[in-house]
Image: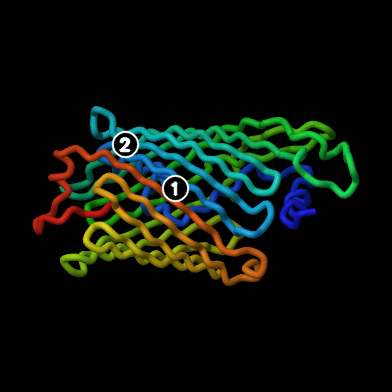
């Protein structure tokens, strides 16, 4: 039996298991609405992004994640809305998320704004047991998939931002979603559990090193009680507001190589490769991620983003 599927089955053998984990993404800095609902308030026009991530390639049953996000301000310009569709598959577990976000802008001073965002989430999870190759032929336990389970959740985020920098905090799941196995029945359960609440803290800055090179350092810190703190340290460079290259170090002995290209001021395509140096690297061949972002920028907002030297700032 495939190694990872065995691990997943062991996890499912208990009476209660978590229905979702937080998905991993390397290029979140190019569209931060994926990880922080408050960032939805920072977009002046339409902004849409989608990504595809294949993690631990070469490892059977490894995670595969896809996501699509869209955001735009409402007529009041103080309020914004966003929506996301996410799909995550690992081993026999198949899950989807439908997300709707409302965000509000608070003007703190002439330059600084605070975006506050709240998302309603519908989690849909299913165990694809019918796809398992068992040692015992026609094992009745693994002949059929589990029913699709629907569970609600919520996200919250605060996003402090100006032209050159940002800082934020987000809670990607306010509730704990779990499965309970009672005999032959599988029930979904949603409850408050502050001990298992994930917290994301992020920040970044844009510096103009020369007339042609911009430097965009950023970080993302993840914390949940009972687990080591995880952080990403990202160093991105942009040449002539067109070609980007970056390196990121993630705790857990992971080095991420990133590259992106702005086809024009609206359309960007990016790629990242995660190279791991842990014991898992003996079985997997790294992780690949592709991101595409498209932004509709009005003429008025393009003029507003120009600084005194005539440069257009790149949104991290």
- Expressed as whole percent of the image width and height from the top left, the position of residue 264 reads 25, 48
* Furthest-front residue in this view: 263
Residue 239 vertical position relative to residue 100 in the rendered view, above or below: below
Q: Earlier in the sequence, mark 1 or mark 2?
A: 1
Pointer 2: what residue?
A: 104
Which element carries disc 2, helix, strand or loop?
A: strand
Secondary structure beneath label 1: loop
Asked if residue 146 is positioned above or below residue 166 in the image, the reply reads: above
* Closer to viewer: mark 1 or mark 2: 1
As drawn, the residue found furthest toward the right would be: 136
Q: Nearer the viewer, residue 313 or 170?
A: 313
Measure how far apart labels 1 and 2 are at the Cα level. Answer: 17 Å
* Residue situated furthest left in the rendering: 308
Looking at the image, residue 277 sits to the left or right of residue 265; the answer is: right
Quadrant in the picture for residue 278: bottom right
Instruction: Return the residue nearer the eye: 184 or 244.
Output: 244
Q: Is residue 108 above or below residue 218?
A: above
Q: Residues within 10 Å of mark 2 (few under 14, many from 20)?
A: many
Position in image of residue 178 (x %, y %)? 67, 40
**Residue 98 got which mark?**
none
The C terminus is located in which quarter?
Answer: bottom left
Residue drawn at 37 percent across, 51 percent down: 269
Q: Residue at x 33, y 42 (%)?
A: 294
Residue at mark 1: 35
């Amino acid at each position: 039996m495939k190694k990872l599927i065995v691990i997943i089955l062991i996890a499912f053998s208990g009476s209660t298991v978590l229905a979702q984990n937080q998905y991993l993404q390397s290029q979140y800095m190019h569209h931060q609405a994926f990880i922080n609902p408050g960032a939805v308030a920072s977009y002046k026009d339409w902004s849409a992004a989608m990504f595809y991530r294949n993690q631990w390639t070469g490892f059977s049953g490894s995670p595969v994640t896809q996501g699509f996000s869209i955001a735009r301000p409402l007529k009041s310009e103080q309020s914004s809305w966003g929506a996301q569709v996410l799909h995550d598959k690992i081993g026999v577990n198949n899950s989807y998320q439908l997300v709707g976000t409302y965000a509000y802008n608070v003007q703190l001073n002439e330059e600084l704004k605070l975006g506050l965002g709240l998302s309603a989430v519908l989690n849909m999870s299913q165990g694809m047991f019918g796809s398992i190759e068992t040692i015992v032929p026609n094992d009745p336990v693994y002949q059929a998939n589990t029913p699709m389970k629907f569970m609600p959740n919520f996200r919250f985020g605060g996003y402090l931002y100006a032209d050159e920098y940002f800082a934020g905090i987000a809670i990607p799941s306010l509730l704990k979603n779990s499965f309970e196995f009672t005999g032959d029945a599988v029930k979904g359960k949603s409850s408050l559990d502050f001990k298992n609440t994930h917290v994301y803290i992020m920040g970044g800055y844009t510096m103009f090193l020369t007339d042609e090179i911009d430097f965009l350092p950023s970080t993302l810190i993840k914390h949940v009680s009972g687990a080591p703190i995880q952080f990403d340290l990202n160093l991105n460079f942009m040449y002539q507001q067109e070609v980007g290259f970056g390196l990121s170090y993630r705790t857990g002995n992971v080095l991420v190589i990133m590259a992106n290209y702005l086809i024009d001021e609206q359309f960007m395509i990016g790629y990242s490769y995660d190279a791991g140096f842990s014991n898992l690297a003996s079985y997997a061949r790294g992780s690949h991620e592709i991101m595409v972002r498209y932004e509709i920028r009005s003429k008025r907002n393009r003029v507003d983003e120009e600084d005194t030297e005539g440069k257009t700032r790149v949104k991290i």
